[in-house]
């Protein structure tokens, strides 16, 4: 790896880590929040301490998801620190999240694929990991499942693109696909994205590989199996799109992100991958780096459709936590926009079209940053109220202290919260500062 590549890699990772560390140290608090009280505190750490944690709980459902890696990480952090502290978990997540841009850059550098206009992909990589749009995942340690899912997906796609004929790599793709299913409900799209990469290679070579066909069938079967074991939460059905009109309106929000509900922006942001992959495929010039980025685009597109269906009824915007699922796809589209500029560079009347992606992408992030930071400050103000109310209760034992408006206590049910705060196993592992005067 050249010195220039090493410096670019280090500079990118340091910038991303510094931006996330600033958010965590400034706006995250040690007090657990919302789902952490049940899924992490009462159902994971308490039975672990009491010696009654059954191994099968590690992959039991949490809402629609199975969050095996997140539970394992929570147990690891607790056993090292001896305290249940959201701030510590959020700090650890900085390292987990940084592994994603590291994977992107190391793969591209090992392929010797970064040169000329292709360096423009750094704009998307830095923006998608350094800006505060996904603050819910950054500030709440329990949200690590998003990072694990993306990591498993990237490695599955890399194995499919880099070692298509290796039986060991195929086994790795299957293992990573199943891990994805056990990480989040939308992990079912990881085997489908890997299958898509094998299919693209078959189209490029104009031949059918029996091993690949068999593997694709198994991968599709894994996705179907993952869907079949996905819990159906009736309370969430009210958010589902009722018809194609709901889907279309939701996709206008999702595909246009980071711009707000704009079909022209959606077209600009996703057309590079959708147009360039068939073009390169027709000319049989899809490189391994192209195949990897194509897999990323396919995976994120599947995520957008799933969110549009699952949360499409009267959608008013994209939630902070879901926005990170678009990251691989947007990086992939940035790559193909740069590839278009590279291929058409000598034709100035056409090459500028590739730059339109970066203009829309950058302007989208610039215009939304103020709104994102406002949401961060509002979240932090509520966190301070939650902390004050919990501390007051621990000091006085007065139940009325926890009877507060929504989000002014860290759990939606004050009675349930009180029972958790009073639990003789949970109370001693809470961050010590909560009990200080």
Image (cartoon, grey):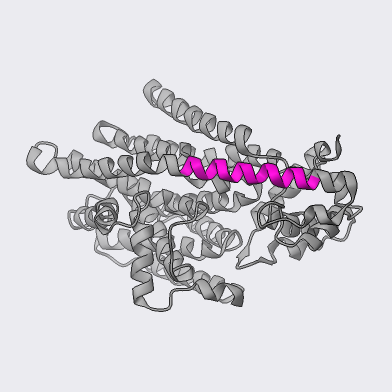
- Residue 406 lies in what quarter of the image? bottom right
Q: Viewer-proximal residue, 281 or 190?
A: 190
Residue 307 vs 373, above or below: the answer is: below
Q: Residue furthest right?
A: 424
In the image, residue 81 lies in the stretch drawn in magenta: no
**Please, what is the dominant secondary structure of the magenta stretch?**
helix
Q: Viewer-proximal residue, 304 or 5?
A: 304
Can you say which quadrant of the picture contains the N terminus?
top left
Residue 111 visible in the picture: no
Looking at the image, residue 409 sits to the left or right of residue 420; the answer is left
Residue 185 vs 40, above or below: the answer is: below
**Residue at (87% x, 52% y) in the render:** 398
In the image, residue 383 lies in the stretch drawn in magenta: yes
Looking at the image, residue 376 sits to the left or right of residue 419; the answer is left
**Residue at (69% x, 48% y) in the render:** 73
**Residue at (80% x, 40% y) in the render:** 431
**Residue at (43% x, 69% y) in the render:** 314
Q: Position of residue 395 (x, y in %)?
A: 88, 43
Q: Viewer-proximal residue, 393 or 128?
A: 393
């Amino acid at each position: 790896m050249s010195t220039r590549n090493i410096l670019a890699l280090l500079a990118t990772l340091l910038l991303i880590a510094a931006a996330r560390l600033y958010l965590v140290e400034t706006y995250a608090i040690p007090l657990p929040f919302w789902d952490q009280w049940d899924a992490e505190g009462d159902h994971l750490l308490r039975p672990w301490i009491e010696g009654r944690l059954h191994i099968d709980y590690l992959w039991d459902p949490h809402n629609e998801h199975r969050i095996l890696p997140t539970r394992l990480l929570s147990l690891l952090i607790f056993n090292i620190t001896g305290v249940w502290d959201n701030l510590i978990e959020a700090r650890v997540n900085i390292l987990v999240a940084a592994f994603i841009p590291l994977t992107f850059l190391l793969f591209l550098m090992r392929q010797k694929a970064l040169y000329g206009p292709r360096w423009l992909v750094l704009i998307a990589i830095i923006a998608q990991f350094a800006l505060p749009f996904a603050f819910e995942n950054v500030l709440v340690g329990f949200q690590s499942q998003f990072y694990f899912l993306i990591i498993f997906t990237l490695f599955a796609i890399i194995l499919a693109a880099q070692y298509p004929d290796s039986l060991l790599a195929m086994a790795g793709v299957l293992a990573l696909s199943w891990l994805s299913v056990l990480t989040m409900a939308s992990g079912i799209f990881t085997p489908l994205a890997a299958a898509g990469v094998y299919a693209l290679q078959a189209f490029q070579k104009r031949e059918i590989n029996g091993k690949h066909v068999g593997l694709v069938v198994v991968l599709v079967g894994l996705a179907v199996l993952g869907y079949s074991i996905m819990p159906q939460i009736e309370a969430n059905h009210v958010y589902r799109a009722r018809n194609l009109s709901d889907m279309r309106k939701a996709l206008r929000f999702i595909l246009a992100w980071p711009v707000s509900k704009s079909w022209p922006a959606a077209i600009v942001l996703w057309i590079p991958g959708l147009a360039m992959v068939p073009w390169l495929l027709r000319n049989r010039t899809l490189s391994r780096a192209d195949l990897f980025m194509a897999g990323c685009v396919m995976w994120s597109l599947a995520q957008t459709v799933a969110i549009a269906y699952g949360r499409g009824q009267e959608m008013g915007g994209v939630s902070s936590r879901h926005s990170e699922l678009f990251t691989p796809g947007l990086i992939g589209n940035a790559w193909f926009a740069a590839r278009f500029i590279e291929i058409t560079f000598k034709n100035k009347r056409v090459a500028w079209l590739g730059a339109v992606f970066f203009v829309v992408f950058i302007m989208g992030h610039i215009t939304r940053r103020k709104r994102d930071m406002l949401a961060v400050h509002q979240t932090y103000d509520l966190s301070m109220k939650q902390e004050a109310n919990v501390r007051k209760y621990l000091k006085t034992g007065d139940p009325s202290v926890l009877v507060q408006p929504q989000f002014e206590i860290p759990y939606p049910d004050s009675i349930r919260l009180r029972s958790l705060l009073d639990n003789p196993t949970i109370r001693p592992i809470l961050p010590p500062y909560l009990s200080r005067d």
